[in-house]
Image (cartoon, grey):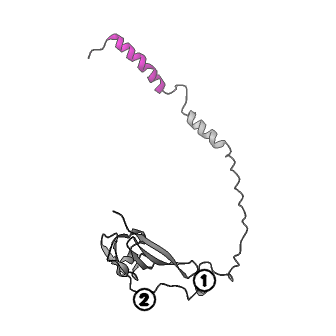
């Protein structure tokens, strides 16, 4: 590529100020500190800035726990006061297959027979249909079947009363219309 005199002049005008800025001053002697050295010395001579005062620690009032003689809120103190003649689940009774499912997950899908010997057909979440008669148990709250009708099953569940005892609660399963 060939350079023209105009290009050389333009290049000289651009490079000349750059070279002048890079050069060191001729008037400074080796014994004079540079501007940076002067600044560092000046900063070191300044007194350090004052520190903020430490925050005042808040004094808390001490509390002495003096309730050792009171009833422990986490103990089962009501169990000795509960009514021992009320209903209770039988811990020795063998669990039936439908007691592993929640009551609301069971669907009555039909009946077999009529009258007092009527049997309900109940479908569990595992898609198995079971035969249910009065006296059998289903649901997770010790639900005992009291009656089987063409339109549903009635049962009584045993639930804790919150005071260490048990109470009966009526429940039912209606026939699922398809």
Where disc 2 sits, the SS reads: loop
**What is the x, y in percent for residue 102?**
41, 72
- Say which residue label 1 marks: 78
What is the distance, in whole Å, between disc 1 and disc 2 at their CAs? 23 Å
Residue drawn at 65 percent across, 81 percent down: 71
Left/right of residue 22 with respect to residue 71 in the rendered view: left
Q: Quadrant of the C terminus?
A: bottom left
Residue drawn at point x = 26 percent, y = 17 percent: 1
Q: Main secondary structure of the magenta part?
A: helix
Image quarter for residue 86?
Answer: bottom right
Choose top left, top right, bottom left or bottom right for residue 118: bottom left
The residue positioned 32% from the left and 70% from the top of the image is 126
User: Is residue 93 shown in magenta?
Assistant: no
How many neighbours does mark 2 have within 10 angstroms: few (below 14), some (14-19), or many (20 or more)?
A: few
Q: Residues within 10 Å of mark 1 (few under 14, many from 20)?
A: few
Q: Which of marks 2 and 1 precedes in the sequence? A: 1
Residue 34 disc label: none
Is residue 100 positioned above or below 81 on the image?
above
Q: From which residue to which does the magenta span run?
A: 1-24
Q: Is residue 45 visible?
A: yes
**Tag 1's secondary structure?**
helix
- Labels 1 & 2 near each other (Cβ < 8 A): no
Is residue 113 placed above or below 47 in the rendered structure?
A: below
Q: Position of residue 30 (x, y in %)?
A: 54, 33
Q: What residue is pinned by disc 2? A: 92
Residue 91 percent across, percent down from the top left: 45, 86
Query: x and y percent of residue 166 in the render?
Result: 53, 81
Q: Is residue 9 magenta?
A: yes
């Amino acid at each position: 590529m060939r350079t023209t005199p105009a290009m050389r002049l333009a290049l000289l005008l651009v490079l000349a100020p750059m070279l002048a800025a890079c050069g060191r001053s001729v008037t400074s002697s080796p014994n004079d500190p540079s501007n940076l050295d002067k600044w560092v010395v000046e900063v070191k001579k300044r007194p350090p800035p004052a520190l903020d005062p430490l925050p005042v620690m808040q004094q808390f009032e001490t509390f002495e726990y003096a309730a050792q003689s009171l009833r422990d809120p986490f103990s089962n103190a009501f169990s000795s006061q509960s009514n021992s003649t009320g209903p209770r689940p039988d811990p020795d009774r063998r669990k039936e297959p439908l007691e592993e499912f929640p009551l609301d997950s069971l669907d009555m899908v039909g009946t077999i027979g009529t009258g007092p010997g009527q049997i309900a057909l109940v479908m569990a979440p595992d898609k198995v249909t079971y035969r249910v008669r009065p006296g059998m148990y289903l649901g997770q709250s010790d639900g005992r079947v009291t009656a089987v009708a063409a339109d549903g099953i009635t049962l009584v569940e045993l639930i804790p009363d919150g005071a260490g005892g048990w109470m009966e609660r009526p429940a039912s399963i209606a026939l699922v219309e398809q």
